[in-house]
Amino acid sequence: MTTASDRKVIVTNRPGRDQLEKIYDILDECFSVGRAYFQERLDLDSAYDPDTTWFATVDGKIAANVQIFPLSVRVGQAVLQTGAMGSVAADPNYRGMGLTHKILAAQTDYMRETGYDISLLLASKHAFYEKAGWRLVPETAYAVEKQPVYEQPDGYEIIPFEPRYLEDIRSIYDQFNHYRTYTVVRNEAYWNDLIHWPDWKKSDCLLLQQNNKIVAYGIIEKKDTEQVFINEFIYLDEAADGVEYLFHELCRLRPKAKQILAMLPEDHKLYSYYHQHQAEPVPIHTAMWKMINLYSTFHKLRPELERRLNDNDWTANQELCIALKCKEERICLDYRHKQLSVSEDIPAGSCVSIEVDERNLITYMIFGYPAEGALEEDAEHADILRALFPKQQAVFYLTDKF
């Protein structure tokens, strides 16, 4: 096995075309999806910035790479700049040298310097990424047995997606996810790129039409397996009566499927349907998070947190000075006269000191502080944490996976 001793290792970004071609070769060797999958994802991204492609060379030869996919992720009314880490690969001839960890460390510095707030990666090798500072935040999907064909309700029609309907589904997406935590802000360019990316081609999209108006859409992964995921299912309020019909039509596209899985917030119409049909919870252990900059994160969260404190019966009429510590970073949350300020300066005096584990803090931000059964390490300040981080109807759509 090659070791790092006596070898010249350089970690950098902004590959030239020839270097990018070598990176695609490594990805092709490491992943069964093939070279074109990775090349199309960047070539068809109009916002692609070579700064986000990082690689390590050993004695001048490209040996490993990691890609940052910049995402704008909502937390309530706030939007956090998120570095989504993907395309992690190392040439088998250079494994064991810690090259990927060196790249991830350099990328963490880069993200901190260029305005990123948090980072997300989707992985199965948790211990490997834990060593690089990412923390697993478990999620839950639901699996339901596929039901017999559903009777078509009056006034609704199912049609396949065509690019001419893109603005319709973009509008539905924006309305449904307005202030919905964990969703990605998709601007026009993002949508235009999205329908050409490889993962879109690996799914099918159906639209629900009512009186010649598109009122809902669903996206299901293209797999001939017994378990199939709904990647995305979004609707307008006026489409409530047609939601189950659209769901069953998506299921019909997968005749071999016995179970249909979905990530569903509790306010989704399909959530009640799943539970009526004895859906099974399925633990999902793939999302790993890292706090890049505590201050910038909470500076952007400030209006959202202020609104939450004002709406909470326990905190609304109080004055609070909170010294919040996460890892080595500390910030001050000063709430007076119904206004919240965020500072890196901790004043002397009667601040409430709260130290929160990084994994817990990100869990609270995304899903909310547990309504019952406060975690032992945070129980002393449960009322404050519950006010700052109420339960969220959060969901990450698999359409945005990277």
Image: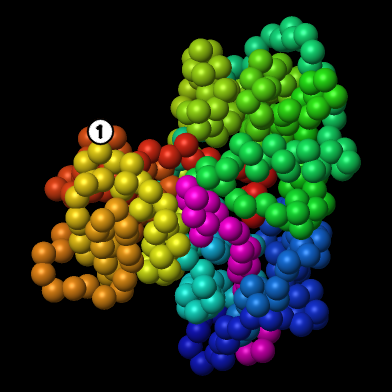
Residue type indicated by callout 1: Glu
Task: From the viewer's side, name the closer residue of 92 and 17.
Answer: 17
Pick the residue in front: 310 or 93.
310
Residue 133 horizontal side relative to residue 32, left or right: left
Q: What residue appears at the point 64 percent right and 55 percent down from the top-left corner?
A: 402
Where on the picture, by quarter, is residue 319? Answer: bottom left
Task: Write down the residue under mark 1.
Answer: 372
* Residue 244 spot, x, y in % from top left: 66, 17
Camera-side residue of 209 and 244? 209
Residue placed most toward the observer, 148 or 185: 185
What is the secondary structure assignment of the residue under circle 1? loop
Report the residue that reaches farthest toward the front. 337
Residue 41 lies, in percent from the top left, at: 75, 59
| Residue 46 falls within the magenta-colored stretch | no
The structure residue drawn at horizontal position 48% and vertical position 28%, both measured from the top left corner, is 266
> x, y (%) of residue 223?
73, 34
Seen in the picture, residue 44 relative to 345 is either above or below; the reply is above
The relative height of residue 107 versus residue 125 in the rendered view (above or below) is below
Where is the N terminus found, in terms of image quarters? bottom right
